[in-house]
Image (cartoon, rainbow, N blue to C red):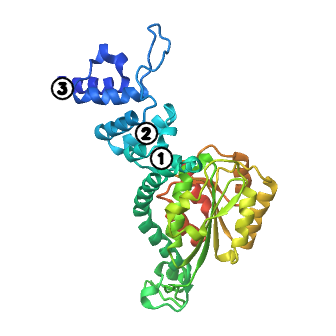
Amino acid sequence: MTEVARQERLRRWRLVLGGPADGSCGKPGGGDAAMDGALAALYDNGDDGEGRSAQRSAGLGGSAPRVARWLGDIREYFPSTVVQVMQADAIERLNLTRLLLEPEMLAAVEPDVHLVGTLLSLNRVMPDRTRDAARQVVRRVVEELEKRIAQQTRAAVTGALNRAARINRPRHADIDWDRTIRANLKHYQPELRTVVPERLVGYGRRTTAVQRDVVLCVDQSGSMAASVVYSGVFAAVLASMRSLRTSLVVFDTAVVDLTDQLDDPVEVLFGTQLGGGTDINRAIGYSQQLITRPRDSIFVLISDLYEGGVREQMLRRVAEMTAAGVQVVVLLALSDEGAPAYDRTNAAALAALGVPAFACTPDAFPDLMAAAIQRRDLVAFAERFADR
């Protein structure tokens, strides 16, 4: 190893380990000293000299201006992905939730899904002078999410709807050659080395009529914050498609229908109330009233399945929907973090009904919707995510 490489390794270890590594790795200087100060304010603990933890040797204190300066510093020294992690750690480790109610703080933070979740949880106690700043933060995140998911979602859903509608007298451009060949294999002509199709299978022509009803039913308990954010944005994108009739229902122990606000996902998110108990049975009961065409309907329940209502009736309602022909999808989370803690007993009971429960990332959700529209087996889809 060259001397330059060795010094770079020592430099990196010093920034990772903090002050106690001064003796072995050397003290940081210049820009590294400023970076180390920003890290120390969040992560360093003091030591009383005998190995016992003392009071934090550095910190951000309770001053909003000081915290705002620190937020500006970390945005200068670190990439945005690291900044988001440090912000989340600061909120948890240093109890900065109260300071997020200050407009100056909101102007300094790096917006992300988790910050939006925190702001939504503070919605009921947020002062009016902070609300406008909070909406601007939420809108920035929503707009970024829409850019990320809208085109992929519309393409996947539109393609699935076109393929789900089959006709037997298609135009040449609408022939589904794969299905046509499979349907006519018995008409293979060995001497011609080809299949002579007696029946053509084609894609349905595009139509502006509503082809599927989609009901998103979202648990808004505190542990589902990121899922609530993504669900609200996806619901708004799906609602913008004429071929779908999309409804959004959120619930804790009460049920709120936010369908009439889907033209503005920011309003949707501020219409949620993160926290509280959970009554999944009541939410499913309300959602059943929205389903008027079972065989053309997709019901997506997003919940960790901790039921505070009547469990047996919840399972009975799911069984009724599947028996009527509704395509039921249960997601333990719709986020990038994977499956949270969830009720495994209820998940197993749903699986016994033929409804697997699994976590889904936002990037995979359009493909999941396409699979549901085409009524493909979702067990294989769920197994893919379980393997991850």
Q: Nearer the viewer, residue 125 or 208?
A: 125
Q: Residues within 10 Å of mark 2 (few under 14, many from 20)?
A: many
- Specify the label residue 69 is tagged with: none
Say which quarter of the image contains residue 313: bottom right
Q: CA distance from mark 3 to mark 2?
A: 33 Å
Q: Amino acid at mark 1?
A: Leu
The answer to whether mark 2 and mark 1 are in CB contact below 8 A is yes
Q: Is residue 126 above or below residue 376?
A: above
Whole-percent x, y for residue 293 in the image: 68, 78
N-term-proximal mark, 2 vs 1: 2
Q: Nearer the viewer, residue 158 or 354?
A: 158
The residue to which callout 3 is attached is: 4
N-term-proximal mark, 1 vs 3: 3
Q: CA distance from mark 1 to mark 3?
A: 39 Å
Q: Is residue 25 left or right of residue 81?
A: left
The residue to which callout 1 is attached is: 115
Q: CA distance from mark 2 to mark 1?
A: 8 Å
Q: Amino acid at mark 2?
A: Gln
The label nearer to you, 1 versus 3, is 1
N-term-proximal mark, 3 vs 2: 3
Whole-percent x, y for residue 183 in the image: 55, 82
Whole-percent x, y for residue 69 in the image: 34, 36
Q: Quadrant of the N terminus?
A: top left
The residue to which callout 2 is attached is: 87
* Residue occupying image coordinates x 35% and y 19%: 19
Q: For numbered disc 3, what is the local secondary structure?
A: helix
Say which quarter of the image contains residue 301: bottom right
The answer to whether mark 1 and mark 3 are in CB contact below 8 A is no
The label nearer to you, 3 versus 2, is 2
Q: Is residue 272 left or right of residue 44?
A: right
Q: Amino acid at mark 3?
A: Val
